[in-house]
Image (cartoon, rainbow, N blue to C red):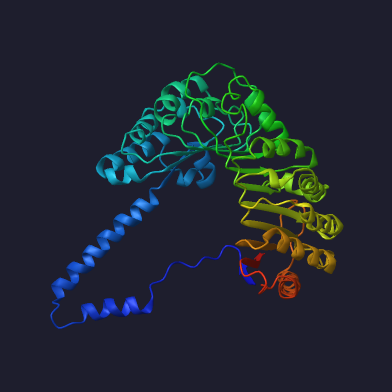
Amino acid sequence: MSVTNAGTTTGPQLFPEIVEAILDYFNTEEQADRLILRECSQVSKHFAIKAQTMLFREIRIIDDEVLANLYGNHNRPASITKRCKWLSEIMDRKPYLASSIQTVSITLGPMATWISHDVEFIAVMERLARPESRFNTLLLRGTSDSVRIADNRAFEKNVLIPFIAPRLTSLHIFLLSNAPIALISECPHLVELNLTHAQAERISSLPRRSSKSPRPTIQRLRVKNSRAMLALLTSHPVLARPFANFNALVEYSDEASGSWDFEAVYLVLMEAKNTLKVLKIMPPSDQGSLQATVTSTMPEYYLNIFRTFDFSQTQKLEKIHISVVFGDHHGPLVANLVQSFGSVSAPNVLQQIELTFHLRADSQATTAALSSAAWSSLRRDISRIAGDNSFKFILNFRAGHLPLSLNTPRESPEELKTIRELLAGEIDTIHSKYFQPSAEQPGLQIEVSCTMYS
């Protein structure tokens, strides 16, 4: 079992023998200082170019008011017009940087009129529309769900249709009260759509008009409040074109807010049973919905799916990832979730099941709420589902303080340390007792990990 602390990363390191070989090369008698400096210079130049192109894979264009709120008036940055002008000059001076840009992240404030009319911003987007560009991903976000694009029609005409739509393959919309429908309907190559922070009622209130663009084929879809969002996507006069059905979906992620979303997910599973490869069902990522989820009967939502849908109908489903948040009071429900795997009729192509438990730090016996019978049952079901095939089961525990409410008191360092040690001990016992590899199933891989949040 691996135990890690969230937020820590280890960068790639050279093997010692490679370092020794480099030092030996520069330490030979035949190499003059001038040659050494030249070689180092070439390495540095190559590294600089690689580092620059890596940094320029994503550019962030942020509203003036948003930056002013971040930095204050004393350190107020240059205006959006100046910053976009500088960016254009850099891209003209170093074309390899312009061609390395893949993602554009645009953050709008309450008074963001520039996105439709600013000449320098439009020039940047025009530069990214050139044939040599790799631009294909757009993150469009507001600072709150009351933020509006001041002139949607001008944005569509001046920016979206000529420069974004022809290239866009991945779209992520966050917290906009009038996200332009054309972002979905006018992008013929769109394959990935993330609407987890978009509100269905705000999109559905937009002016409706027909589209003559080629129909996009959405292959990766991520939504929240799936019943409302999927109802919009399948019934809206414009959006219904790319979402007449979901029979092209390869990956579906659902941040479910309650058991009432069950029917919507069931619809997707039925429609995409011949194409779906990855299914992810997880708790909402925002704080308010997460708090509601913990106090709801969320695990019953999963039970409905496992008990009702025959997964053996799916032709290509390879991975299932289930996440759930719970505290002590959720023990019986989550035990039922674990036992519900007994009703899963797995397709032959299923290669991986990942189960993630988000544990409350103030629940000192959370894992103990799952009885030995539950863990034993889960282990038997995983063995049954895996059969003689090559199969991977991943059991994750995410433990620590979750900000379920602004009024939730944080644990002291001593309390947190005690909780961590207790959970780590419990999880280590679960790992060693129930999830060791079996010689009878050499193709079954089992991973158990625990990440501790501070």
- Residue 180 in the image: state x and y as whole percent: 55, 26
Q: Residue at x 26, y 45 (%)?
A: 94
Position of residue 103 in the picture relative to residue 432 (left or right): left
| Residue 392, quarter of picture | bottom right
| Residue 431, quarter of picture | bottom right
Relative to 411, does residue 233 appear above or below in the rendering? Answer: above
Relative to 20, does residue 75 appear above or below in the rendering? Answer: above
Position of residue 319 in the picture relative to residue 71 (left or right): right
| Relative depth, front residue between 43 and 20 | 20
What is the quadrant of the N terminus in the image? bottom right
| Relative depth, front residue between 112 and 142 | 142
- Residue 92 in the image: state x and y as whole percent: 27, 39
Q: Residue at x 34, y 40 (%)?
A: 87
| Residue 358, quarter of picture | bottom right
Kindly tell me whether residue 202 is visible in this rendering.
no
Relative to 230, does residue 97 appear above or below in the rendering? Answer: below
- Residue 446 in the image: state x and y as whole percent: 65, 67
Q: Residue at x 42, y 27 (%)?
A: 159
- Residue 203 in the image: state x and y as whole percent: 62, 27
Kindly tell me whether residue 34 is visible in this rendering.
yes
Position of residue 128 in the picture relative to residue 394 (left or right): left
Q: Residue at x 66, y 52 (%)?
A: 320
Q: Which residue extends farthest bottom?
A: 29
What is the quadrant of the C terminus in the image? bottom right
| Relative depth, front residue between 378 and 335 | 378
